[in-house]
Image (tube, helix red, strand yellow):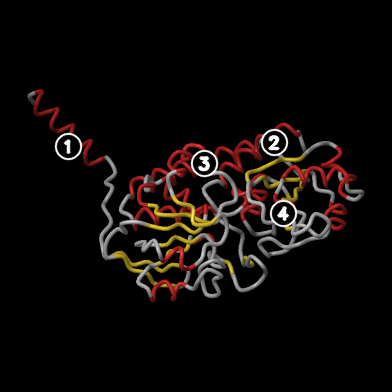
Amino acid sequence: MHTHTLTAALLSAVAFALPVHADTTYPLSLSNCGVDVTFDQAPEDVVSVGQAGTEILYSLGLGDKVLGTAVWFTSVLPEFADLNAGVERLADNDPSFESVVAKRPGLVTVQYEWHIGPQGIVATREQFADVGIPTYVLPADCWDKDNTTGSDGTRSALFEMESVHAGVTELSQIFNVTEKGEALVADLKAREAAAIEKAKALDLTDASAVFWFSSAEMDIDPYVAGAKGAPGYMMEKLGLRNVVESDEEWPTVSWESIARANPSIIVLARMERRRFPADDVEKKLEFLKSDPVTSQMDAVKNDRIVILDGHSMDPSIRNVDALETLAEALQAYQLK
């Protein structure tokens, strides 16, 4: 065979071996948190009500389509700081229905159904549909989860990272950037596996934890992570026992109960949001070390306190960052 013929044959074989990234076929129909949505084409622009959706959109290279954002816990991921500075923030917390509609977006992405959902405090999905604006709720907020019970919903099964992957995948399909969606999911999976393997090597047998997100007042029962939310998943994967057994997403539990359980480590949320006094991580630390009950816990006495980005405690692509941080901390603490 002549050389040029061989080269052509090899190129042809390589082409068949490479994965084919197909464009989205429209109309695209999805069942999204109990609502059927159809897209005849990729939306021209979007308003994101929730930091989790905003950071997925940015990660998919769709920042130029974002008209406005709302519901922020922490600063945006560092790599998107410049991009985000040029995007209008409709509200730090809850935007008004009117402020979202005024942007006339082709889509509204939603992190929590309690903002936009059956009893949404911003609006219902039907209200947006009535003005011709489709909505998409991140699947992690309704995946094996009942948002009609508890202040933040109740899960019927342990949170799965697959629910975050589903949001990435479906948004990449909606906007016809499927290749970027596949790459992002692959990266998240690889990093997750590495963090879990690092913790598994520690062979933890009786280590436990509690995740403190915030408190409505410093001297009342804190909002801590329930058994089946994203922190519960992190603990299960890293070999930690959650001392909180409630299936609510963020139940309130007394410090006396937590102190009796005496968790091996305490995980605190750090955030820029200031809805409650305990949103400030420095106030959390001061409370733990000065309160007569909490100051007696082994984790406080031995400074086994991990500080995590608050947004990473809710379902988001930042859950992998949290896994990595926790795995490194566990190595340093040398627990058994």
Q: Reading the chain from its start, which is encountered first: label 3 or label 1?
A: 1
Q: Nearer the viewer, residue 146 or 175?
A: 175
What element does badge 3 sit on? loop
Residue 206 versus residue 42 in the image, above or below: above
Which residue is the site of mark 2?
Answer: 329
Q: Reading the chain from its start, which is encountered first: label 2 or label 3?
A: 3
What element does badge 1 sit on? helix
- Residue type at tag 1: Ser
What element does badge 4 sit on? strand
Which residue is the site of mark 1?
Answer: 12
- Residue type at tag 2: Ala
Residue at x-position 50% and y-position 54%: 164
Residue 73 place in picture, x, y as percent: 60, 51
Residue 336 visible? The answer is no
Q: Are marks 1 and 2 in contact (CB under 8 Å)?
A: no
Gap in angstroms between the C-alphas marked 1 and 2: 49 Å
Which residue is the site of mark 4?
Answer: 214
Which residue is the site of mark 3?
Answer: 77
- Residue type at tag 4: Ser
Taking 309 as reference, is 243 left or right?
Answer: right
